[in-house]
Amino acid sequence: MEVKYSLSIESVTKRYRDFLAVDNVSLKIRSGIIFGFLGPNGAGKTTTIKMTGGLLKPSSGDISICGHSITKEPVLAKSDLGFVPDRPYLYEKLTGIEYLRFIGGIYNLSETEITRRSEELLSLFEIYGFKDELIENYSHGMKQRLVICGALIHRPRLFVIDEPLVGLDPKGARLLKRVFLELARKSDTTVFMSTHTLQVVEELCDELAIIHHGRIIYSGDINGMKRLLGNADANLEELFLQLTGGDEQVPLDNII
Ligand code: ATP
């Protein structure tokens, strides 16, 4: 049977002037899985994610979403993509429902579909009662919930989210984790998330990749990582630190 890839990153490089932020990254991510994209601060996660969403152009290589190149067929590629960047831009002078109507319109959804999807998503994320409030009056977590509603309104086949749990309270975080599982298991949607919360990766992700200094240093599942490092009993934090060289203890004397 032919394997279907929702996201295909092919030999992608990104330079900022003479600094190589992403160095020849290739990843193929199957439909219907939850994929964790990990790496230390400054490793190249957000740069890769911005290229996946078409917000940044690769210096070389290409990225395809459900078979469509984000650079050559951006409209087709984006029609299958739900995208939540690390710092989403929201039109603060719109109300929540106006924002979702605007987003739904961009995806060419019918009026009826926009109304139905907005109501069900706003209710699911428990912000329905605020739908007629201006976004500028929303709390940080409410804005994050609204952006997620907007990114799911058109039932994307690939859902890309940069640091999903930042700003969400424990109840919101638990709901989002359930949503990820439902998307992957029931709707065959791929969830691609970058996160520093390794416990969430252990809990949810079928596969993961680690980027370090712009290069992929591991791609596969957690068990494969344990085998690679010969450490069957380690948790993901220990494995991550072992691979990225962050497990040495710096002395704190006289500083703290
Ligand atoms: P974090 O976990 O801290 O969010 P990250 O893995 O998302 O990090 P990126 O934001 O992708 O890292 O940054 C990768 C590297 O590229 C960093 O060294 C960063 O300083 C650099 N960088 C990012 N954006 C720019 C830019 N616009 N101009 C120059 N350098 C940049």
Image: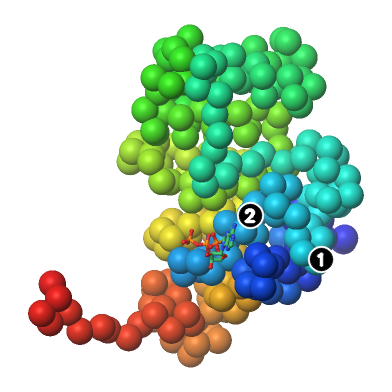
Seen in the picture, residue 239 relative to 60 is either above or below; the reply is below
* Residue receiving disc 1: 61
Q: Residue furthest bottom?
A: 230
Look at 13% across and 72% down and name the residue there. Answer: 256
Q: Quadrant of ligand 1?
A: bottom right
Amino acid identity at mark 1:
Gly
Residue 93 shows in the view: yes
For badge 2, the amino acid type reads: Ile
Considering only order in the chain, which callout, 2 or 1, is on the residue closer to the N terminus?
2
Q: Is mark 2 within 8 Å of ligand 1?
A: yes
The quarter of the image holding the N terminus is: bottom right
Residue 255: % across, % down? 14, 76
Label 1: how many Cα within 10 Å (few below 14, some 14–19, many 20+): some
Horizontal relation, residue 45 to residue 190: left or right: left
Direction from residue 92 to residue 166 in the image, left or right:
left
x and y, in percent, of residue 172 in the image: 39, 36
**Would residue 115 appear left or right of 166 to someone viewing this image?**
right
Respond yes or no on whether mark 1 lies under 8 Å from ligand 1.
Answer: no
| Of residues 14 and 112, the one drawn nearer to the viewer in this rendering | 14
Q: At which x and y percent is residue 165?
A: 43, 46
Q: Is residue 255 above or below residue 87?
A: below
Please give the residue where the numbered disc 2 appears in the rendered image.
49
Q: How many marks?
A: 2
